[in-house]
Amino acid sequence: MKRILVITAVAALGMISTSTYAQMGVAILNQFSSVSTPSKEIRKEARELRRMEVSYSTREGFARDFPDATNVAFQKGQGMDEVMFTENNVDFTAFYDEQGELIGTTTEKKFDEIPLAAQKSIYKHYPEYLVNKVILFDDNEYNDSDMTLYQQEFEDQDNYFVELSKPGKTIILMVNMEGNVTFFHNL
C-alpha cells in the first residue's frame, strides 16, 4: 500500500512539475511571439524610416561616380537623394534621382569665379547688397531630370547661384556660364 501511495505521489508531482514547465514554456513563447511580431505602430515607423533612407541604387551610383570620395554622408531630400562628400579637398553635394542616376553636383565658389560680365551686372544692379555665398550647380548632361535648389525647380544646366543680402532681404540670382544674370528666388 505504501508503494502505491509513493508511486501516486511521485506521479502527481511529475504532473504538477510538467504542468508548471508547460505554463512557463507558454509564457516564454508568448514573450517571444510579441517580440517577433512587431505592433502596427512599429511597422508603420519602420516604413517611414525606410522612406527616409537613401536608395540602394543611389549608393551604388555614387560609388561608381565618385570612387575617390571621402567624408561621405547620405541624406534623403525631397524627390531626390543627396550625398555630401569631399573630393580633392573640395566639398560637394551630389543629387540623385529615384533611379539612382546622378542629376548634378553643387559646390561653393568665390564671387570672382563667376563670369566677369555677371560680376559687373550684379555690382551695377544690386549695389546695396552684399554677396553671401556662390554655389555652382554642375549638371549631369546625361540625365534629363530637372533640379530643385532653394525650393525652386529649374532646367538642368550648369549655373551659378549667387546669394545676396541687405538688411531685411535676401535674394538668389542665377548666373549662366555666359554671364547672363536672372532673378531666381527670394529667401
Image: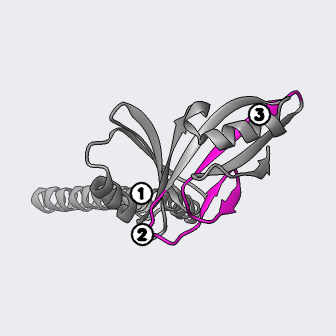
Which kind of residue does numbered mark 2 sit on?
Tyr
The mark lying in front, picked from 3 and 1, is: 3
- Relative vertical location of residue 127 with respect to residue 103 in this rendering, above or below: above
Residue 123 numbered mark, or none: 3
Residue type indicated by callout 1: Val
* Mark toward the viewer: 3 or 2: 3
In the rendered structure, which segment of residues is drawn in magenta?
139-167
To which residue does mark 2 refer?
142
**Disc 1 vs disc 2: which is toward the camera?**
2
**Residue 56: where, in percent of width, then height?**
36, 62
Q: Secondary structure at mark 1?
A: helix
Q: Amino acid type of disc 3?
A: Tyr
Q: Please indicate, yes or no, whether residue 133 appears anywhere in the rendered image.
A: yes
Instruction: Give the Cα distance between marks 1 and 2.
Output: 48 Å
Mark 3 or mark 1: name the one nearer the start of the chain: 1
Is residue 29 visible in the rendered structure shown here? no
Looking at the rendered structure, the secondary structure element under dot 2 is loop
Q: Spatial distance from mark 3 to mark 1, Cα to Cα?
A: 65 Å
- Are the residues flagged by discs 1 and 2 in contact, CB closer than 8 Å? no
Image side of residue 53 versus residue 151, left or right: left
Residue extending farthest to the left is 3
Disc 1 target residue: 35
Q: Quadrant of the N terminus?
A: bottom left
Where is residue 171, by image quadrant? top right
- Count neighbours of disc 3 (C-alpha within 10 A) and say few if under 14, some if 14 to 19, many if 20 or more: few
**Of label 3 and label 2, which has the lower sequence position?**
3
Q: Measure the alpha-carbon separation of dots 3 and 2.
A: 35 Å
Q: What residue is drawn where x is 50% and y is 59%?
A: 46
Q: Quadrant of residue 121?
A: top right
Residue 35 point in image, percent of width and height = 42, 57
